[in-house]
Amino acid sequence: MTEPSVSSVDELVAQARQQVAVAITLEELSAARTVMLGKRSGLVAARKALAQMAPQDRRQAGQALNEAKQVIEELFSAREAELAAAARTQKLAAERLDLTEVTQQSKHGYLHVITQTQQELEDIFVGMGYKIAEGPEIESEWYNFGALNFPEGHPARDMYDTLYVDYGEPASTLLRTHTSPVQARVMESQAPPIYVVAPGRCFRQDTADATHMPVFHQIEGLVVDKGTSMGHLAGTIEAFTSAYFGPGFTSRLRPSYFPFTEPSAEFDVQRPDGTWLELGGCGMVHPNVLSACGINPEQWQGFAFGFGIDRLALIRFGIGDLRDLWSNDVRFLEQF
């Protein structure tokens, strides 16, 4: 085997410089390092050749090889640092987030049609002198039924297809079936006179179809004052009809039954073409409800009314299927 010479050592260093210079990725540099410093490299072969040299020459040649190895390792280490820094810079650039403040209002994003309808209804009733009241969606049996004159075992409870919650005593906690519990809470916490509307989400075990959903929205109104009558109720509904639907619409009351009002009525809206559409229920607040909420029915009287926000949205925008409101189809929702 040829003994290592100064020229051969210099050639190894020169070759290493060339390999380092052409490597542009860490993977390429790693492959070049194996060629120059691996088990089959020229440097290792030269080191093995030292055993065949004369003792007086071996020391000088070994020192030259050690110096060459050190130079080569430094070349690779320096290039590795450069490529690693470049890789980090490239990665940071790719992951960079644009946090520039938006100076122009985005043209995308708007309120859902149900939310639009609810806010419009709230504005109408606030303009009529009402306040907005809210309450929990998970209710006790007392506020959802008991305080509203639904005795235990009353058949009217079966109309509501209630969803009960596994909390407390069986059938003691539920997802509210209407927003009437908010009225009971207001009467308990506030002395008359009371003028409030309670919009919100309700829940029943309904099968989804064109006119029903297990989750729906209601808005209910409550007035408790001295000397109120069915005439005041009829006038309020007529004023609302004109404010929401516009001229050409009118309303009427039909006798009905609800446990929490007496007398009770359904109210319909007449379209300009003469057809009638049932909108909701109403009536004078039952004396038992007033008493249950701590209000003297001999001194105060009241009326209540309620209707579905979802149904009003269908009427206003001419939507044929309630399920479309829950489809999340942008092509449909962006029309409103």
Image (tube, rainbow, N blue to C red):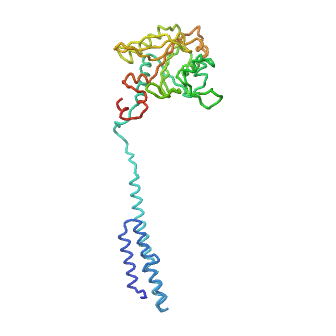
In the image, residue 199 above or below residue 36: above
Q: Is 22 drawn above or below residue 244 in the view shown?
A: below
Q: Nearer the viewer, residue 166 or 233?
A: 166
Residue 31 lies in quadrant: bottom left
- x and y, in percent, of residue 183 in the image: 54, 19
Residue at 39% over, 78% down: 13
Extreme residue toward the right, this view: 169
Quadrant where the N terminus lies?
A: bottom left
Q: Nearer the viewer, residue 220 or 319?
A: 319
| Image location (x, y in percent) of residue 227 | 52, 7
Residue at image location 61% in from the left, 19% down from the top: 146
Looking at the image, residue 247 sits to the left or right of residue 47; the answer is left
Residue at x 34%, y 36% (from the top left corner): 107
Q: Position of residue 242 (x, y in %)?
A: 38, 15
> How many labels were placed on the picture?
0
Give the side of residue 167 with respect to residue 230, left or right: right
Quarter of the image with the C terminus is top left
In the figure, 233 relative to 115: above or below?
above
Q: Quadrant of residue 311?
A: top left
| Horizontal side of residue 184 vs 218, given as left or right | right
Question: Viewer-proximal residue, 54 or 75?
Answer: 54
- Between 82 and 181, the one lying in front of the other is 181
Q: What percent of the width, then of the height, locates residue 98?
A: 38, 47
